[in-house]
Every structure is written in C-alpha cells, then in structure tokens.
Image: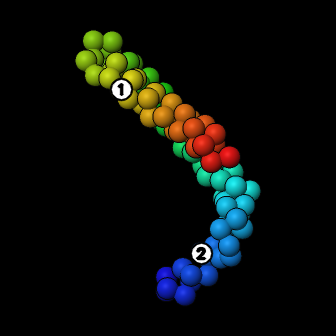
Amino acid sequence: MGIHQVLDIMPTGSLPEINSSFKHEIWPLLKMLCYAIAAMLGLIAGLRIYNLWNVNGRHHVHIDAQVISWGAAAIFLVVATAFINVALM
C-alpha cells in the first residue's frame, strides 16, 4: 500500500467535521466489532472449558483460571466499549 493510498483514506477537514465523522460513521462500526470479538471470546472460552471438563475431568487444576481469564477478557471488551461510548459521546 503506497503513501497516497493511505492519505486517501485519512479523514480530512476541520476538527468538528472529523469528530462528527468519527461519532456517526466510525464509532458504531468499532463498537459492533468489540461486541463481536467479545462474543467470539465467549464462545471459544465455553468450548475450551467444556472440553477440559469432559476430557480431563474436574480435577484439572487450571480450569478455574481459564474460566476467570476468558470471562474477564470478554467482560473487559464490553465494559471498555461502554466506557468509551460514555466518554466520547
């Protein structure tokens, strides 16, 4: 990708125009992307943990850590999206 192609997709205009463009065009897409990533993390986490419980049994040491880490990642994306929505909008 050349420098001219990068410059063509960069926003132009005054700061209020760029801010308006971000609020009405870019942010809704980023918000939906964050929600989609959080949903995918939740699905992958559910499948991994289900697999650990069925294959290795409950005595597997790292199941609780996996539940917390995958759940925290999905919750972080949702909370970060809500925080940015309140802070920027």
Judge depth for marks 2 and 1 and give the one in front.
2
Query: Relative to the observer, which residue lies in front, 38 or 59?
Result: 38
Q: Position of residue 16 (x, y in %)?
A: 70, 65
Q: First in sequence: mark 2 or mark 1?
A: 2
Is label 1 in a helix, a strand or a loop?
helix
Residue at 61% across / 76% down in the picture? Answer: 9
Residue 74 seen? no
Q: What is the quadrant of residue 10 in the picture?
A: bottom right
Query: Relative to the observer, which residue lies in front, 28 or 11?
Result: 11
Extreme-top residue of the structure: 59
Residue at 39% across / 19% down in the picture? Answer: 54
Q: Position of residue 2 (x, y in %)?
A: 49, 86
Q: Residues within 10 Å of mark 1 (few under 14, many from 20)?
A: some
Query: Relative to the observer, which residue lies in front, 16 or 38?
Result: 16
Depicted 12 relative to depicted 58: above or below: below
Residue 19 seen? yes
Residue at 32% across / 23% down in the picture? Answer: 65
Query: Relative to the observer, which residue lies in front, 29 or 85?
Result: 85
Name the disc covering residue 66, or none. 1
Residue 19 appears left or right of 63: right
Depicted 68 relative to depicted 88: above or below: above
Q: What is the quadrant of residue 6 in the picture?
A: bottom right
Say which amino acid is labelled 2. Met
Label tally: 2
Q: What is the quadrant of residue 17 in the picture?
A: bottom right
Q: Report the Cα–Cα distance between label 2 and label 1.
A: 40 Å
Depicted 21 relative to depicted 30: above or below: below
Q: Which residue is mark 2?
A: 10
Q: Residues within 10 Å of mark 2 (few under 14, many from 20)?
A: few
Q: Position of residue 70 (x, y in %)?
A: 42, 31
